Image: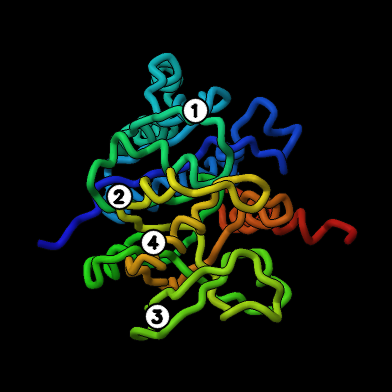
Amino acid sequence: MKKEIKKAVIPAAGWGTRFLPQTKAMPKEMLPVVDKPVIQYVVEEIVKSGIKDIVIITGWQKRAIEDHFDRSFELEKYLHSVGKIKELSEIKEIASLANFIYIRQKSDFYGNAIPVLMAEPVIDDQFFAVLWGDEFIEANPPRLSQMLKVFEKYQGGIISAVEIETKDKLSRYGIAEIELVEENIFKIKKIVEKPLPEEAPSNLATHGAYILPSEIFKTIKNLKPGKGGEIWLVDAINQLIKEGFPFYACKIKNGKYYDTGNKLEYLKTVIEFALRHPEFSEEFKKFLKGLKI
């Protein structure tokens, strides 16, 4: 019997130190891309891909995320009273996007595998999706939807992948050693984390979104701290591959990656989305053209 993906996990417990002091009291996942926070783009991708149960791993400083996806009755009442029906509809829709489950990260260890491990109590013996809360890919069809089709066929671990066009950028990502299966699908032999350009096994970066088996939890628990003394998800994936568990890279079609966890790339994203905004794109274009650059 083929297995289905019913839950998605969004790790959102990090400190966001690259954006300090902005993120001292505000979660990095709540940084706005014009008028919508980054994490909402991630949630919308999951929902468009057909998954309604979303587990968000948070921390004590992340209450704003929970508040954003909750109802705000006082605000709704005010918007109704002043006739702002469009805005009222938008904020009510946010709360009904999905079934949200919140788990606070409590661990003595650091690393991007830890928030994934925190989701174990609500995942049980199932495959599940993981998408980071501070970056997103715009794709048609949605990235996760493309990955789910690959999972349906191969029933293994799936990682979203993008081609890195210039060698100097290879050292920013986990680069996969791969074997072609069909068109945009590759069997992963191993992932080399942030290799030197001359040591990269391919130009295919595997990151951003994952479909993982529940076996990943036991593997994470047995990992020893790696680079920087942290527990890394890529180490757990590589261990499962060594043990014979199949993982595939799905090269995303018609997609563009927005690394909103990086200051410069975040600013580029905001400008690009502002230039598309139906309310003020033309005015914004005039403003940019008028700058003395």
User: Which label's residue is closer to the chain start, 2 or 1?
Assistant: 1
Q: Which residue is mark 4?
A: 240
Res. 134 in view: yes
Q: Amino acid at mark 3?
A: Asn
Residue at the spot x=46%, y=24% of the render?
67
Q: Which is nearer the eye, 70 or 107?
A: 107
The relative height of residue 149 versus residue 94 in the rendered view (above or below) is below
Question: Dividing the image into 4 quarters, which one contains the N terminus?
Answer: bottom left
Q: Are marks 2 and 4 in contact (CB under 8 Å)?
A: no
Within 10 Å of disc 1 (Cα), the crowding (few <14, some 14-19, many 20+) is: some
- At mark 2, the secondary structure is loop
Task: Nearest to the eye among marks 4 and 3: give it.
Answer: 4
Colour scheme? rainbow
Which residue is the site of mark 1?
A: 106
Residue 269 versus residue 101 in the image, above or below: below
Q: Tell me what residue is drawn at x 40 percent, y 58 percent.
A: 210
From the viewer's perspective, tell me whether residue 39 is left or right of residue 241.
Answer: right
Q: Quadrant of residue 123?
A: top left
What separation in Å lies between label 4 and label 3 (alpha carbons)?
22 Å
Which residue is more in the foreground, 82 or 134? 134
Dot 1: element: loop
Count of number-bearing discs: 4
Real-space Cα distance between discs 1 and 3? 38 Å
